[in-house]
Amino acid sequence: MMRNKFALPLLGLALILIFQACKENKKDKKAVITDGFTSGTLVFAADESFSPIVDEEEYVFRALYPDAKPAIKYLPESEVVNQLLNDKVRVAIISRELDTTETGILKRRALAPDVNKFAVDAVTIIVNQLSTDTLTSVKEIIGMLNGTVKTDKSIVFDNPNSSLVRYLKQLSGNKDFTQKNIYALKSNKEVIKYVSEHPNAIGITGFAWLNDPDTDYADAVAKVKIVGVKDDANKSAPGEYFKPSQTTLVQHTYPLSRSLYIVDCTGRKGLGAGFASFLASERGQRIILKSGLLPDSIPSREINITH
C-alpha cells in the first residue's frame, strides 16, 4: 500500500522534471549562436533609403568572406527602429543615432547598442530636365514644406515612414505635411520616375539613388537634374549655391545632409560586428567613396613611383 501511495506523486514529479528539461532544451536550441565575425547567418534590418550602398557593401563582403551570409531586410526607418527595440533584430542600419529613451530600452534588456557612423548622404532636390528651376534655398524649401511659400509645383518624396520624411519634418518643424501639393510615394525610385515625367514637380531624394542607377530607372535619372541649394545661415558662404558632392559634403557647404550608422546590439563579436568593421575598413570606405557618398574616413591613395 505504501508503494502505491507514493508511486503516483513520484511519477507526476518525474513527468514535471522531464517537461521542464525539454523546455530548457528548446531554449538552449533557440539560444544557439549561428554566426561568427566573418561567418554564419544573422538577420539585419536596414533603412530602405540606403539599399543601393548597403547592397554594394554586402556584395563585396560576401565575396571576401564566402562563409558569411548576412540576411538584410529593407524597411522604412521607423519600422527598422521598432524591430530593434522589440528584439526582432539586433543589428540595424539607419540615418540617425538612437535617442535617450531608445538607448535606455535597449540597455535595460542588456542589449547596449554599439553605434558606428560609416557614411554621409546628401538630401537632394531634383527637378525635370525641362524645368527652368536650377536654384533654391533652405529657407524656400522650409517655406514650401510649411505652406508659407506659395508654389504651384508638386513636391514628392518617398514613403511617409521613411528617414527622409523624418528629416524633412525636423528641418521644417512640422509634425505632418498637410498641403495638397505635397505627396508621399512609395520609394526613391518612384520619386525619380515621377519627376522625370512631370516638368512641374520637385522631388526630394537621397543622393545615393542618383549615382550609378540600376537599369530599371536609369532612364528616369537621365531626365532629371539636381538643384543647387543656398543656406543663408552659412557664415562662410551665405549667398552661394551648392550642389551635393563629396567636396561640398566634406566642406559642409552643401546644407542638406544626414549620416549613416550601423547599430549592433548583439553584445558580441559576431557577424554584426564583422560587417560594421568591414564598413569602417579601407575597403568598405572605398566602396562608399566610389558610390558618390562621403565616407566617414577618407581612404588613403597609394601612388607608385617608377624610375
Image (cartoon, rainbow, N blue to C red):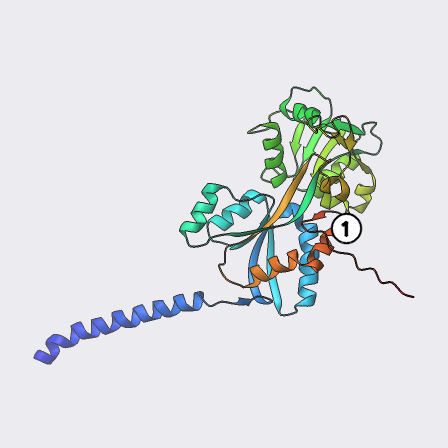
Q: Residue at x 55, y 67 (%)?
A: 36
Q: Residue 89: give x, y in percent of width and height.
A: 51, 54
Q: Nearer the viewer, residue 238 or 209?
A: 238
SS at mark 1?
A: loop
Extreme residue in the left direction: 1
Q: Nearer the viewer, residue 17 or 233?
A: 233
Asked whether, in this view, residue 43 is left or right of residue 193, the answer is left
Q: Residue 30: give x, y in percent of width and height.
A: 44, 65
Asked whether, in this view, residue 176 is left or right of residue 208, the answer is left
Instruction: Examine the rendering and report whether any part of residue 96 can be seen.
Output: yes
Mark 1 is surrounded, within 10 Å at the Cα level, by few (under 14), some (14 to 19) or many (20 or more) other residues, namely: few
Q: State the count of labels.
A: 1
User: Of the residues shown, which amino acid type is indicated by label 1?
Assistant: Asp
Q: Nearer the viewer, residue 261 or 210?
A: 261
Image quarter in which the C terminus is found: bottom right
Q: Residue 140: give x, y in percent of width and height.
A: 70, 24
Residue named by callout 1? 214
Image quarter in which the N terminus is found: bottom left
Displayed quadrant of residue 63: bottom right
